[in-house]
Image (cartoon, rainbow, N blue to C red):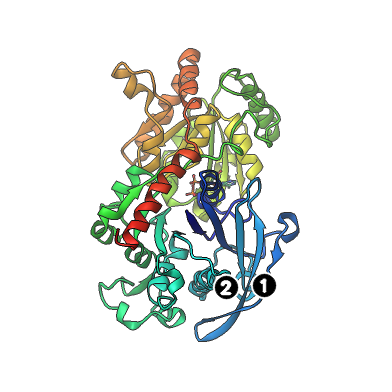
Amino acid sequence: MKIVFVSSEVFPFSKTGGLADVTGALPKALSSLGCEVKIFTPKYSSIDEDKFGLKYNWKIGEMPIRVNSIIRSAHLHQALLPDSNVEVNFIDCPHYFFRGQIYTEHPDEDERFILFSKAVLETLQRFNWAPDVIHCNDWQTGLLPLFLRDNYNWDKLFENTATLYTIHNMGYQGKFSTSTLLSAEIRSGFYFPGGPVEFEDSVSFMKTGILFSDIINTVSKTYAQEILTPEYGAGLDGVLRERKDDLYGILNGADYSTWDPAHDKHLPYHYSSNDLSGKLKNKKFLLEHLKLPFAEDIPLIGIISRMVHQKGFDIVTGASTDLMNLDAQWVILGNGLSEFENLIRSLSKKYPGKVSAYIGYNNELAHLIEAGADIFLMPSKYEPCGLNQIYSLRYGTVPVVRKTGGLADTVHDWHHLKSLGDESGTGFTFDDYSSYTLYTTVKRSVETFPDKSTWHKIQMNGMKKEYSWETSAKEYLKLYQKAVEKRRNI
Ligand code: ADP
Protein backbone atom coordinates (compact mmCIF):
# COMPACT_ATOMS: atom_id res chain seq x y z
CA MET A 1 0.00 0.00 0.00
CA LYS A 2 1.27 3.50 -0.87
CA ILE A 3 0.93 5.98 1.98
CA VAL A 4 1.68 9.67 2.22
CA PHE A 5 2.13 10.82 5.78
CA VAL A 6 1.62 14.56 6.32
CA SER A 7 2.62 16.16 9.60
CA SER A 8 3.79 19.53 10.91
CA GLU A 9 6.33 17.78 13.19
CA VAL A 10 8.54 14.75 12.67
CA PHE A 11 11.10 13.48 15.17
CA PRO A 12 14.13 13.93 15.04
CA PHE A 13 13.82 16.90 12.67
CA SER A 14 11.24 18.98 14.54
CA LYS A 15 9.36 18.40 17.77
CA THR A 16 7.16 20.23 20.23
CA GLY A 17 5.26 17.22 21.57
CA GLY A 18 3.97 13.70 21.05
CA LEU A 19 2.90 14.28 17.44
CA ALA A 20 6.56 14.32 16.42
CA ASP A 21 7.21 11.04 18.23
CA VAL A 22 4.30 9.44 16.37
CA THR A 23 5.27 10.66 12.93
CA GLY A 24 8.90 9.73 13.51
CA ALA A 25 7.96 6.16 14.40
CA LEU A 26 4.72 5.00 12.77
CA PRO A 27 6.00 5.39 9.17
CA LYS A 28 8.95 3.13 10.04
CA ALA A 29 6.62 0.47 11.42
CA LEU A 30 4.38 0.74 8.34
CA SER A 31 7.39 0.41 6.09
CA SER A 32 8.41 -2.78 7.95
CA LEU A 33 4.93 -4.14 7.23
CA GLY A 34 5.56 -3.64 3.50
CA CYS A 35 3.97 -0.22 2.89
CA GLU A 36 5.66 2.33 0.67
CA VAL A 37 5.63 5.48 2.81
CA LYS A 38 6.58 9.05 1.98
CA ILE A 39 6.54 11.62 4.80
CA PHE A 40 5.87 15.30 4.12
CA THR A 41 6.73 18.01 6.62
CA PRO A 42 7.72 21.69 6.50
CA LYS A 43 11.39 22.58 6.37
CA TYR A 44 11.66 24.89 9.36
CA SER A 45 14.81 26.97 9.67
CA SER A 46 15.69 25.06 12.87
CA ILE A 47 16.23 21.82 10.92
CA ASP A 48 19.93 21.17 10.51
CA GLU A 49 20.42 20.37 6.78
CA ASP A 50 23.97 19.09 7.17
CA LYS A 51 23.31 16.93 10.21
CA PHE A 52 20.40 15.16 8.54
CA GLY A 53 21.82 15.19 5.00
CA LEU A 54 18.95 17.09 3.37
CA LYS A 55 19.26 17.33 -0.41
CA TYR A 56 17.57 19.87 -2.64
CA ASN A 57 15.50 18.16 -5.33
CA TRP A 58 16.57 19.78 -8.62
CA LYS A 59 14.10 17.75 -10.66
CA ILE A 60 11.19 19.33 -8.83
CA GLY A 61 12.80 22.76 -8.73
CA GLU A 62 10.59 25.67 -7.81
CA MET A 63 6.83 25.12 -7.42
CA PRO A 64 4.69 28.25 -7.77
CA ILE A 65 1.83 28.11 -5.25
CA ARG A 66 -0.70 30.87 -4.80
CA VAL A 67 -1.59 31.77 -1.22
CA ASN A 68 -3.52 34.89 -0.32
CA SER A 69 -3.40 35.97 -3.97
CA ILE A 70 0.41 36.00 -4.02
CA ILE A 71 2.42 33.39 -5.87
CA ARG A 72 5.01 31.94 -3.54
CA SER A 73 7.80 29.66 -4.56
CA ALA A 74 8.05 26.34 -2.73
CA HIS A 75 10.75 23.75 -3.18
CA LEU A 76 11.64 20.35 -1.93
CA HIS A 77 14.45 18.92 0.16
CA GLN A 78 14.71 15.21 0.87
CA ALA A 79 16.36 12.94 3.41
CA LEU A 80 15.79 9.54 4.95
CA LEU A 81 14.16 9.02 8.32
CA PRO A 82 17.09 7.81 10.49
CA ASP A 83 17.47 4.01 10.70
CA SER A 84 15.00 3.42 7.90
CA ASN A 85 14.39 3.65 4.18
CA VAL A 86 11.46 6.00 4.65
CA GLU A 87 11.73 9.09 2.46
CA VAL A 88 11.10 12.42 4.16
CA ASN A 89 10.04 15.29 1.90
CA PHE A 90 10.63 18.73 3.37
CA ILE A 91 8.54 21.50 1.87
CA ASP A 92 10.48 24.72 1.94
CA CYS A 93 9.19 28.20 1.45
CA PRO A 94 11.45 30.54 3.46
CA HIS A 95 8.82 33.27 3.52
CA TYR A 96 6.71 30.98 5.73
CA PHE A 97 9.13 28.58 7.39
CA PHE A 98 12.21 30.66 8.10
CA ARG A 99 10.95 31.73 11.51
CA GLY A 100 12.05 31.38 15.11
CA GLN A 101 9.53 28.69 16.01
CA ILE A 102 7.64 25.77 14.52
CA TYR A 103 4.28 27.37 15.40
CA THR A 104 3.79 31.10 15.56
CA GLU A 105 1.13 33.57 16.55
CA HIS A 106 1.79 35.57 13.40
CA PRO A 107 -1.25 36.75 11.44
CA ASP A 108 -0.34 34.46 8.53
CA GLU A 109 -0.20 31.22 10.55
CA ASP A 110 -3.06 29.87 8.42
CA GLU A 111 -1.19 30.69 5.22
CA ARG A 112 1.86 28.71 6.34
CA PHE A 113 -0.14 25.50 6.49
CA ILE A 114 -2.26 26.29 3.43
CA LEU A 115 0.95 26.51 1.45
CA PHE A 116 2.25 23.34 3.06
CA SER A 117 -0.89 21.30 2.27
CA LYS A 118 -1.05 22.51 -1.32
CA ALA A 119 2.66 21.90 -1.81
CA VAL A 120 2.20 18.25 -0.76
CA LEU A 121 -0.31 17.73 -3.58
CA GLU A 122 1.77 19.73 -6.04
CA THR A 123 4.82 17.60 -5.26
CA LEU A 124 2.87 14.37 -5.71
CA GLN A 125 1.72 15.64 -9.11
CA ARG A 126 5.32 16.30 -10.09
CA PHE A 127 6.36 12.85 -8.80
CA ASN A 128 3.39 11.49 -10.78
CA TRP A 129 2.87 9.28 -7.71
CA ALA A 130 -0.65 8.55 -6.52
CA PRO A 131 -0.83 7.29 -2.95
CA ASP A 132 -3.62 4.94 -1.85
CA VAL A 133 -4.02 7.01 1.29
CA ILE A 134 -2.95 10.46 2.42
CA HIS A 135 -2.69 10.32 6.19
CA CYS A 136 -3.25 13.83 7.62
CA ASN A 137 -2.51 14.79 11.20
CA ASP A 138 -4.00 17.55 13.35
CA TRP A 139 -5.30 20.98 12.35
CA GLN A 140 -2.28 21.98 10.30
CA THR A 141 -3.26 19.45 7.63
CA GLY A 142 -7.05 19.78 8.04
CA LEU A 143 -7.64 21.59 4.74
CA LEU A 144 -5.81 18.99 2.69
CA PRO A 145 -8.76 16.55 2.35
CA LEU A 146 -10.89 19.46 1.05
CA PHE A 147 -8.19 20.56 -1.41
CA LEU A 148 -8.01 16.98 -2.67
CA ARG A 149 -11.78 16.74 -3.12
CA ASP A 150 -12.29 20.19 -4.61
CA ASN A 151 -9.35 22.34 -5.69
CA TYR A 152 -7.38 19.38 -7.10
CA ASN A 153 -10.37 17.28 -8.04
CA TRP A 154 -9.62 17.88 -11.72
CA ASP A 155 -6.50 15.72 -11.49
CA LYS A 156 -7.25 12.06 -12.30
CA LEU A 157 -4.01 11.14 -10.51
CA PHE A 158 -5.84 11.45 -7.19
CA GLU A 159 -9.01 9.71 -8.36
CA ASN A 160 -8.52 6.76 -6.03
CA THR A 161 -6.61 8.49 -3.26
CA ALA A 162 -8.35 8.21 0.11
CA THR A 163 -7.71 10.26 3.24
CA LEU A 164 -7.33 9.38 6.90
CA TYR A 165 -7.43 12.23 9.40
CA THR A 166 -5.84 11.65 12.80
CA ILE A 167 -6.78 13.92 15.68
CA HIS A 168 -3.93 14.09 18.17
CA ASN A 169 -5.53 16.81 20.30
CA MET A 170 -8.99 18.43 20.10
CA GLY A 171 -7.65 21.43 22.00
CA TYR A 172 -5.83 22.84 18.98
CA GLN A 173 -8.28 23.28 16.12
CA GLY A 174 -6.79 25.89 13.80
CA LYS A 175 -9.53 28.56 13.84
CA PHE A 176 -8.98 31.58 11.63
CA SER A 177 -10.90 34.54 10.31
CA THR A 178 -12.87 34.28 7.08
CA SER A 179 -9.95 35.85 5.19
CA THR A 180 -8.63 32.27 5.15
CA LEU A 181 -11.26 31.43 2.53
CA LEU A 182 -9.58 33.75 0.07
CA SER A 183 -6.04 32.79 1.12
CA ALA A 184 -6.81 29.11 0.60
CA GLU A 185 -9.13 29.59 -2.37
CA ILE A 186 -11.95 27.72 -0.68
CA ARG A 187 -15.21 28.13 -2.59
CA SER A 188 -17.66 30.33 -0.76
CA GLY A 189 -20.30 27.60 -1.08
CA PHE A 190 -18.51 25.64 1.66
CA TYR A 191 -18.78 28.51 4.12
CA PHE A 192 -22.12 29.22 5.77
CA PRO A 193 -23.36 28.99 9.36
CA GLY A 194 -23.12 25.32 10.31
CA GLY A 195 -21.41 24.53 6.98
CA PRO A 196 -18.48 22.12 6.64
CA VAL A 197 -15.76 24.75 6.94
CA GLU A 198 -17.47 27.12 9.38
CA PHE A 199 -17.21 26.94 13.16
CA GLU A 200 -18.12 29.78 15.50
CA ASP A 201 -18.00 32.37 12.71
CA SER A 202 -14.51 31.28 11.76
CA VAL A 203 -12.81 28.92 9.36
CA SER A 204 -11.95 25.72 11.22
CA PHE A 205 -9.15 23.59 9.80
CA MET A 206 -10.01 20.72 12.11
CA LYS A 207 -13.71 20.67 11.32
CA THR A 208 -12.84 20.66 7.62
CA GLY A 209 -10.48 17.73 8.16
CA ILE A 210 -13.14 15.81 10.08
CA LEU A 211 -15.82 16.35 7.44
CA PHE A 212 -13.83 15.86 4.23
CA SER A 213 -11.69 12.85 5.08
CA ASP A 214 -12.82 9.29 4.42
CA ILE A 215 -11.94 7.93 7.85
CA ILE A 216 -11.07 9.67 11.12
CA ASN A 217 -9.23 8.39 14.11
CA THR A 218 -7.73 9.53 17.34
CA VAL A 219 -4.94 8.13 19.43
CA SER A 220 -6.68 6.00 22.03
CA LYS A 221 -9.96 4.15 22.28
CA THR A 222 -11.11 6.04 25.37
CA TYR A 223 -10.38 9.46 23.83
CA ALA A 224 -12.30 8.40 20.68
CA GLN A 225 -15.33 7.91 22.95
CA GLU A 226 -14.72 10.97 25.11
CA ILE A 227 -14.60 13.44 22.20
CA LEU A 228 -18.17 12.55 21.31
CA THR A 229 -19.25 14.33 24.50
CA PRO A 230 -19.52 18.10 25.13
CA GLU A 231 -17.02 17.84 27.98
CA TYR A 232 -14.19 16.65 25.74
CA GLY A 233 -15.33 17.55 22.21
CA ALA A 234 -14.21 21.19 22.47
CA GLY A 235 -17.28 22.32 20.53
CA LEU A 236 -16.84 19.77 17.73
CA ASP A 237 -18.53 16.85 19.51
CA GLY A 238 -21.68 17.30 17.39
CA VAL A 239 -19.64 17.17 14.18
CA LEU A 240 -17.85 14.08 15.44
CA ARG A 241 -21.13 12.42 16.38
CA GLU A 242 -22.24 12.96 12.78
CA ARG A 243 -19.22 10.93 11.71
CA LYS A 244 -19.09 8.47 14.56
CA ASP A 245 -19.39 5.42 12.30
CA ASP A 246 -16.10 6.46 10.67
CA LEU A 247 -14.32 7.35 13.91
CA TYR A 248 -11.78 4.95 15.44
CA GLY A 249 -9.24 4.93 18.26
CA ILE A 250 -5.74 3.50 17.90
CA LEU A 251 -3.33 3.79 20.78
CA ASN A 252 0.08 5.23 19.93
CA GLY A 253 3.05 2.95 20.37
CA ALA A 254 6.33 3.77 22.01
CA ASP A 255 9.51 3.85 19.98
CA TYR A 256 11.44 1.39 22.11
CA SER A 257 14.57 1.88 19.98
CA THR A 258 14.80 5.30 21.66
CA TRP A 259 12.82 4.77 24.86
CA ASP A 260 14.09 1.62 26.56
CA PRO A 261 16.39 1.71 29.63
CA ALA A 262 18.22 -1.38 28.34
CA HIS A 263 19.88 0.66 25.58
CA ASP A 264 18.82 4.31 26.04
CA LYS A 265 21.83 6.28 24.78
CA HIS A 266 21.18 9.16 27.19
CA LEU A 267 21.56 7.05 30.33
CA PRO A 268 24.78 6.53 32.26
CA TYR A 269 23.52 3.12 33.48
CA HIS A 270 21.41 0.64 31.57
CA TYR A 271 18.93 -1.73 33.20
CA SER A 272 15.99 -3.98 32.47
CA SER A 273 13.33 -5.92 34.35
CA ASN A 274 15.92 -8.65 35.07
CA ASP A 275 18.04 -6.33 37.16
CA LEU A 276 16.91 -2.96 38.43
CA SER A 277 20.19 -1.97 40.10
CA GLY A 278 20.97 0.39 37.20
CA LYS A 279 17.78 2.30 37.96
CA LEU A 280 18.99 3.18 41.44
CA LYS A 281 22.36 4.30 40.03
CA ASN A 282 20.53 6.55 37.56
CA LYS A 283 18.53 8.02 40.45
CA LYS A 284 21.74 8.81 42.29
CA PHE A 285 23.30 10.30 39.15
CA LEU A 286 20.21 12.41 38.44
CA LEU A 287 19.96 13.75 41.99
CA GLU A 288 23.65 14.67 41.99
CA HIS A 289 23.18 16.39 38.65
CA LEU A 290 20.21 18.33 40.09
CA LYS A 291 22.09 19.08 43.32
CA LEU A 292 19.44 17.36 45.43
CA PRO A 293 20.43 15.04 48.33
CA PHE A 294 20.17 11.32 47.59
CA ALA A 295 18.03 9.15 49.87
CA GLU A 296 17.12 5.73 48.62
CA ASP A 297 13.98 5.53 50.76
CA ILE A 298 12.49 8.82 49.67
CA PRO A 299 10.63 8.56 46.38
CA LEU A 300 11.59 10.90 43.58
CA ILE A 301 8.56 12.12 41.66
CA GLY A 302 9.09 13.24 38.06
CA ILE A 303 7.04 15.46 35.76
CA ILE A 304 7.89 16.09 32.09
CA SER A 305 5.22 18.16 30.47
CA ARG A 306 4.02 21.14 28.60
CA MET A 307 2.89 23.45 31.42
CA VAL A 308 -0.66 24.12 30.27
CA HIS A 309 -4.17 23.61 31.67
CA GLN A 310 -4.60 20.37 29.69
CA LYS A 311 -1.79 18.72 31.62
CA GLY A 312 -3.44 19.36 35.01
CA PHE A 313 -1.28 22.21 36.24
CA ASP A 314 -4.25 24.01 37.74
CA ILE A 315 -4.95 21.12 40.10
CA VAL A 316 -1.24 20.81 40.80
CA THR A 317 -1.33 24.50 41.79
CA GLY A 318 -4.23 23.89 44.18
CA ALA A 319 -2.53 20.86 45.74
CA SER A 320 0.99 22.25 45.82
CA THR A 321 1.23 22.97 49.56
CA ASP A 322 -0.07 19.51 50.50
CA LEU A 323 2.13 17.83 47.89
CA MET A 324 5.21 19.60 49.29
CA ASN A 325 4.40 18.25 52.74
CA LEU A 326 4.73 14.66 51.51
CA ASP A 327 7.98 12.87 52.19
CA ALA A 328 9.13 12.94 48.57
CA GLN A 329 11.48 14.74 46.21
CA TRP A 330 10.47 16.32 42.91
CA VAL A 331 12.06 16.87 39.54
CA ILE A 332 9.96 18.92 37.16
CA LEU A 333 10.83 19.58 33.51
CA GLY A 334 8.72 21.61 31.14
CA ASN A 335 7.62 24.95 29.87
CA GLY A 336 4.42 26.67 28.86
CA LEU A 337 2.18 29.24 30.52
CA SER A 338 4.06 31.73 32.69
CA GLU A 339 1.64 31.29 35.63
CA PHE A 340 2.62 27.61 35.87
CA GLU A 341 6.30 28.16 35.10
CA ASN A 342 6.37 30.73 37.95
CA LEU A 343 4.64 28.37 40.36
CA ILE A 344 7.16 25.61 39.67
CA ARG A 345 10.09 28.05 39.91
CA SER A 346 8.78 29.34 43.23
CA LEU A 347 8.44 25.80 44.62
CA SER A 348 12.06 25.05 43.74
CA LYS A 349 13.14 28.25 45.51
CA LYS A 350 11.00 27.57 48.58
CA TYR A 351 11.96 23.89 48.89
CA PRO A 352 15.58 23.81 47.65
CA GLY A 353 16.51 20.32 48.88
CA LYS A 354 13.25 18.87 47.73
CA VAL A 355 12.31 20.31 44.35
CA SER A 356 14.36 20.78 41.22
CA ALA A 357 12.84 22.62 38.27
CA TYR A 358 14.07 22.94 34.73
CA ILE A 359 11.94 25.40 32.80
CA GLY A 360 12.57 24.69 29.15
CA TYR A 361 12.92 21.83 26.72
CA ASN A 362 15.62 19.23 27.34
CA ASN A 363 15.41 15.84 25.67
CA GLU A 364 18.38 14.32 27.50
CA LEU A 365 17.02 15.36 30.88
CA ALA A 366 13.64 13.86 29.90
CA HIS A 367 15.34 10.47 29.43
CA LEU A 368 17.24 10.82 32.71
CA ILE A 369 14.05 11.66 34.60
CA GLU A 370 12.24 8.65 33.13
CA ALA A 371 15.09 6.45 34.38
CA GLY A 372 15.93 8.12 37.68
CA ALA A 373 12.50 8.94 39.08
CA ASP A 374 10.49 6.43 41.14
CA ILE A 375 7.06 7.90 40.35
CA PHE A 376 5.85 9.78 37.27
CA LEU A 377 2.98 12.24 37.66
CA MET A 378 0.59 13.02 34.80
CA PRO A 379 -2.69 14.46 36.15
CA SER A 380 -4.11 15.57 32.77
CA LYS A 381 -7.52 17.15 32.41
CA TYR A 382 -7.71 15.30 29.14
CA GLU A 383 -5.09 13.20 27.36
CA PRO A 384 -5.58 11.92 23.80
CA CYS A 385 -2.91 9.24 24.29
CA GLY A 386 0.06 10.49 26.27
CA LEU A 387 3.49 9.03 25.76
CA ASN A 388 5.37 9.73 28.94
CA GLN A 389 3.26 7.34 31.01
CA ILE A 390 3.97 4.63 28.42
CA TYR A 391 7.70 5.37 28.62
CA SER A 392 7.45 5.41 32.43
CA LEU A 393 5.98 1.91 32.46
CA ARG A 394 9.00 0.61 30.52
CA TYR A 395 11.44 2.48 32.81
CA GLY A 396 9.95 0.99 36.00
CA THR A 397 8.83 4.50 37.00
CA VAL A 398 5.38 4.01 38.43
CA PRO A 399 2.81 6.36 36.86
CA VAL A 400 0.25 8.35 38.84
CA VAL A 401 -2.33 9.55 36.32
CA ARG A 402 -5.81 10.87 35.94
CA LYS A 403 -8.04 8.23 34.41
CA THR A 404 -8.78 9.85 31.07
CA GLY A 405 -8.07 9.14 27.37
CA GLY A 406 -4.90 7.17 26.72
CA LEU A 407 -3.93 7.35 30.38
CA ALA A 408 -7.03 5.30 31.25
CA ASP A 409 -6.13 2.79 28.53
CA THR A 410 -2.54 2.26 29.65
CA VAL A 411 -2.35 2.62 33.45
CA HIS A 412 -4.32 0.38 35.78
CA ASP A 413 -4.75 1.18 39.44
CA TRP A 414 -2.91 -1.15 41.79
CA HIS A 415 -5.26 -0.82 44.78
CA HIS A 416 -8.44 -0.97 42.74
CA LEU A 417 -7.42 -4.21 41.04
CA LYS A 418 -5.97 -5.62 44.25
CA SER A 419 -9.36 -5.15 45.93
CA LEU A 420 -10.74 -7.45 43.22
CA GLY A 421 -8.04 -10.03 43.92
CA ASP A 422 -6.02 -9.04 40.86
CA GLU A 423 -2.32 -8.16 41.22
CA SER A 424 -1.78 -6.79 37.73
CA GLY A 425 -1.95 -3.06 38.55
CA THR A 426 0.69 -0.84 36.95
CA GLY A 427 0.19 2.49 38.71
CA PHE A 428 -2.18 4.77 40.59
CA THR A 429 -5.16 6.49 38.98
CA PHE A 430 -7.92 8.92 39.92
CA ASP A 431 -11.18 10.00 38.25
CA ASP A 432 -12.20 13.27 39.79
CA TYR A 433 -10.40 16.27 38.32
CA SER A 434 -9.62 18.00 41.63
CA SER A 435 -6.60 19.03 43.68
CA TYR A 436 -7.85 16.85 46.52
CA THR A 437 -7.99 13.58 44.58
CA LEU A 438 -4.70 14.42 42.92
CA TYR A 439 -3.13 14.88 46.35
CA THR A 440 -4.64 11.75 47.89
CA THR A 441 -3.53 9.64 44.92
CA VAL A 442 0.04 10.92 44.98
CA LYS A 443 -0.02 10.29 48.75
CA ARG A 444 -1.21 6.74 48.11
CA SER A 445 1.76 6.14 45.80
CA VAL A 446 4.25 7.71 48.24
CA GLU A 447 2.88 5.55 51.07
CA THR A 448 3.13 2.40 48.94
CA PHE A 449 6.75 3.08 47.96
CA PRO A 450 8.36 1.78 51.20
CA ASP A 451 6.65 -1.61 50.72
CA LYS A 452 9.48 -2.89 48.53
CA SER A 453 7.92 -6.15 47.38
CA THR A 454 4.63 -4.49 46.35
CA TRP A 455 6.53 -1.69 44.64
CA HIS A 456 8.70 -4.17 42.78
CA LYS A 457 5.60 -6.06 41.63
CA ILE A 458 3.99 -2.86 40.29
CA GLN A 459 7.22 -1.95 38.50
CA MET A 460 7.48 -5.42 36.94
CA ASN A 461 3.85 -5.35 35.78
CA GLY A 462 4.54 -2.08 33.96
CA MET A 463 7.92 -3.05 32.53
CA LYS A 464 6.43 -6.14 30.92
CA LYS A 465 3.78 -4.15 29.04
CA GLU A 466 4.40 -3.84 25.34
CA TYR A 467 2.98 -0.84 23.48
CA SER A 468 4.91 -1.39 20.29
CA TRP A 469 4.40 0.52 17.06
CA GLU A 470 4.13 -2.77 15.22
CA THR A 471 0.78 -3.51 16.90
CA SER A 472 -0.53 0.02 16.22
CA ALA A 473 0.75 -0.01 12.62
CA LYS A 474 -1.24 -3.20 11.95
CA GLU A 475 -4.36 -1.41 13.14
CA TYR A 476 -3.56 1.60 10.95
CA LEU A 477 -3.27 -0.74 7.96
CA LYS A 478 -6.84 -1.87 8.60
CA LEU A 479 -8.00 1.76 8.71
CA TYR A 480 -6.18 2.54 5.46
CA GLN A 481 -7.99 -0.39 3.89
CA LYS A 482 -11.33 0.94 5.15
CA ALA A 483 -10.52 4.42 3.78
CA VAL A 484 -9.61 2.96 0.38
CA GLU A 485 -12.82 0.92 0.25
CA LYS A 486 -14.86 3.98 1.12
CA ARG A 487 -13.16 6.09 -1.51
CA ARG A 488 -13.62 3.47 -4.18
CA ASN A 489 -17.14 2.58 -3.05
CA ILE A 490 -16.18 -1.04 -2.63
P1 ADP B 1 1.90 16.17 24.29
O1 ADP B 1 2.13 15.75 22.87
O2 ADP B 1 0.47 16.48 24.60
O3 ADP B 1 2.81 17.29 24.72
P2 ADP B 1 2.78 13.49 25.04
O4 ADP B 1 2.90 12.81 26.36
O5 ADP B 1 1.98 12.79 23.99
O6 ADP B 1 2.26 14.96 25.28
O7 ADP B 1 4.25 13.69 24.45
C1 ADP B 1 5.16 14.54 25.01
C2 ADP B 1 6.53 14.27 24.41
O8 ADP B 1 7.30 15.46 24.50
C3 ADP B 1 7.30 13.22 25.15
O9 ADP B 1 8.22 12.59 24.30
C4 ADP B 1 8.04 14.07 26.21
O10 ADP B 1 9.18 13.43 26.70
C5 ADP B 1 8.37 15.29 25.43
N1 ADP B 1 8.48 16.52 26.21
C6 ADP B 1 7.47 17.29 26.68
N2 ADP B 1 7.97 18.38 27.32
C7 ADP B 1 9.32 18.26 27.25
C8 ADP B 1 10.41 19.06 27.73
N3 ADP B 1 10.20 20.19 28.39
N4 ADP B 1 11.65 18.64 27.49
C9 ADP B 1 11.87 17.48 26.81
N5 ADP B 1 10.90 16.69 26.33
C10 ADP B 1 9.64 17.07 26.55
Specify which label sits upstream in the sequence, 2 or 1. Answer: 1
Residue marked by disc 1: 59
Q: Residue at x 28, y 19 (%)?
A: 420
Q: Secondary structure at mark 2?
A: helix
Q: Are marks 2 and 1 in contact (CB under 8 Å)?
A: yes
Quadrant location of residue 366?
Answer: top right
Report the side of 117 relative to 13 (left or right): left
Q: Amino acid at mark 2?
A: Arg
Q: Residue at x 35, y 74 (%)?
A: 202
User: Residue 126: which disc?
Assistant: 2
The CA span between labels 2 and 1 is 9 Å
Give the x, y percent position of residue 234: 32, 58
* Residue at the outermost bottom position: 69
Give the x, y percent position of residue 462: 47, 26
Q: Residue at x 69, y 36 (%)?
A: 265
| In the rendered image, the vertical position of residue 246 relative to residue 176, given as above or below | above
User: Residue 381: which disc?
Assistant: none
Of residues 264 and 187, the one nearer the viewer is 187
Quadrant location of residue 49?
Answer: bottom right
Q: Amino acid at mark 1?
A: Lys
Give the x, y percent position of residue 75: 63, 73
Of residues 241 and 124, the one nearer the viewer is 124
Quadrant location of residue 444?
Answer: top left
Q: Is mark 2 within 8 Å of ligand 1?
A: no
* Residue at the outermost right position: 50
Report the side of 225 relative to 464 (left or right): left
Report the side of 365 relative to 212 (left or right): right
